[in-house]
């Protein structure tokens, strides 16, 4: 029996990891470590690109092999570098949009609380 898997989602998730690594930890990486925001970013990107599906037979083919085989036989209109840049651009757009839309929520839930003993002294002016 074959199982149908979304091959695009795996690629998008990997590329999101790479792009987020270029952003500062606080607040971007910390915010998108929250599962709901991460899913929103994944959905943002996936709805803007074509999806590729593949069939994996029980235990005979790994997801990585199926992804390579599927993409090898499917001819895309763009060149691989152009595709990657397009995907990265969509990820950057999604990050900016989500951070703008949810800025109040992110500030409330992601911002670090400062311990009073860690604050700079005001005694020195």
Image: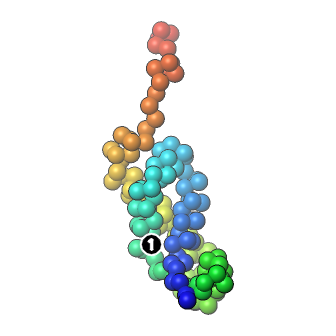
Q: Check the picture and name the quadrant holding the N terminus.
A: bottom right
- Up the image or down, 53 lies above or below 89; here it is below
Determine if residue 99 is in view: yes
* Residue at 45% over, 65% down: 42
Q: Where does the image place residue 110, in percent across and percent down from the top left?
A: 43, 42
> In the visual, does 102 lie left or right of 76?
left
State how the image is colored. Answer: rainbow
Q: Nearer the viewer, residue 116 or 57?
A: 57
Instruction: Where is residue 96? Give x, y as percent.
Output: 42, 56
- Is 45 drawn above or below residue 20 in the view shown? below
Seen in the image, is 80 located left or right of residue 47?
Answer: right
Camera-nearest residue between 79 and 6 = 6
Viewer-side residue, 3 vs 105 = 3
Give the residue drawn at x 53%, y 84%.
3
| Mark 1 neighbour class, 10 Å CA radius: few under 14, some 14 to 19, many 20 or more | some
The reply to whether residue 70 is visible in this rendering is: no
Q: Which residue is mark 1?
A: 46
Name the residue located 52 percent from the left edge and 50 percent from the top edge.
29
Percent from the top left, x then y, of residue 113? 44, 31
Up the image or down, 83 lies above or below 98; here it is below
Residue 19, located in which quarter of the rendered image?
bottom right
């Amino acid at each position: 029996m074959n199982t149908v898997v979304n091959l695009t989602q795996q690629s998008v998730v990997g590329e999101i990891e790479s792009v987020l690594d270029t952003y500062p930890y606080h607040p971007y990486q910390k915010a998108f470590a929250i599962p709901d925001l991460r899913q929103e970013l994944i959905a943002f990107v996936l709805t803007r690109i074509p999806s590729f599906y593949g069939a994996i037979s029980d235990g005979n083919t790994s997801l990585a092999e199926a992804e390579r085989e599927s993409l090898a036989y499917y001819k895309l209109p763009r060149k691989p570098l152009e595709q990657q840049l397009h995907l990265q651009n969509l990820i950057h757009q999604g990050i900016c949009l989500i951070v703008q839309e949810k800025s109040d929520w992110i500030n409330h839930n992601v911002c670090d609380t400062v311990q009073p003993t860690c604050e700079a002294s005001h005694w020195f002016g």
